[in-house]
């Protein structure tokens, strides 16, 4: 990866590398689909991970689903999470459900490569995409919906400044047919 074209980057001091967000190619999306086959992700993210590498649009559509009342159909901003020592993305960050009338959107971040989970990479990627949303897209409110059982993601959002807005009980259909509780977290731009 050529760091000179990196869209957004944050230094990850403990790992001695940069966490970089950049747009992805079809080959990158195919790699993310392979990483998403990890069944542990179903419990933490709440979606079926059995995507085909032949159907890239299905994967993008699945990660682009939004659930907040202010969200609207929009073209998502989908970026890969890269490390300066790797050529392939280890996860993704996405802005979705953009409502330009309300200057709002939803955000999603997933570190799909098991080797890099729970090491602060997701938090740095979330911080990067939040700054992009506020500074480049002039958005004012960013929402996140997280399974209530996913304490790691809830704490990650809190560390970036998100506040708990509401618990949405039995609001997310899980792959096994049950309904899971979600938390709605929100971050407002400080002006």
Image (cartoon, rainbow, N blue to C red):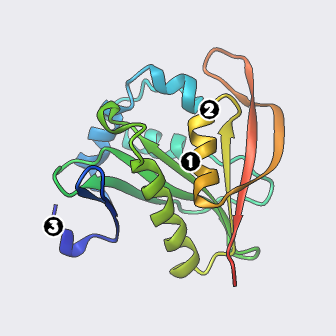
Q: Which residue is mark 1?
A: 156
Q: Residue at x 27, y 70 (%)?
A: 6
Chain-order first, disc 2 or disc 3: 3
Query: Which mark, residue 2?
Result: 3
Q: Which numbered mark, 2 or 3, is in the foreground of this view?
A: 2
Is residue 6 positioned above or below 153 on the image? below
Measured in 3D between alpha carbons, the distance from the residue under mark 1 to the one under mark 3, in whole angstroms, is 28 Å
Residue at 19% in and 69% down: 3
Question: Could you classify mark 2 by the number of other residues whose Cα lies within 10 Å: few (under 14), some (14-19), or many (20 or more)?
Answer: some
Say if residue 22 shows up in the picture: no
Q: Please provide percent x and percent y for residue 105.
A: 65, 63
The CA distance from mark 2 to mark 1 is 10 Å
Q: Along the polypeptide, which appears first: circle 2 or circle 1? A: 2
The front one of 90 and 102 is: 90
Q: Quadrant of the N terminus?
A: bottom left
Q: In what element is the residue under mark 3? A: loop
Image quadrant in which you'd find residue 186: bottom right
Secondary-structure class at tag 1: helix
Tell me what residue is drawn at x 56 percent, y 23 percent: 43
- Mark in the foreground, 1 or 3: 1
Query: Of all residues shown, which one is farthest toward the bottom?
Result: 191
Q: Is residue 101 left or right of residue 176?
A: right
């Amino acid at each position: 990866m050529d760091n000179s074209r990196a869209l957004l980057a944050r230094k990850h001091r403990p790992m001695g590398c940069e966490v970089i967000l950049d747009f992805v190619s079809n080959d990158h999306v195919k790699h993310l689909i392979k990483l998403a086959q990890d069944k542990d992700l179903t419990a933490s993210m709440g979606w079926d991970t059995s995507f085909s590498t032949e159907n890239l649009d299905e994967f993008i559509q699945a990660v682009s689903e939004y659930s907040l009342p202010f969200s609207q159909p929009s073209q998502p901003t989908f970026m890969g999470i890269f490390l300066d020592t790797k050529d392939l993305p280890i996860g993704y960050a996405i802005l979705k459900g953009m409502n330009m009338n309300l200057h709002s959107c939803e955000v999603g971040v997933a570190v799909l490569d098991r080797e890099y989970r729970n090491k602060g990479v997701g938090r740095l990627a979330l911080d990067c995409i939040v700054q992009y949303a506020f500074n480049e897209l002039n958005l004012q409110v960013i929402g996140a919906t997280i399974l209530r059982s996913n304490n790691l993601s809830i704490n990650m959002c809190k560390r970036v400044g998100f506040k708990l807005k509401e618990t949405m009980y039995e609001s997310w259909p899980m792959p096994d047919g049950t309904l899971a509780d979600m938390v709605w977290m929100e971050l407002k731009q400080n002006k």
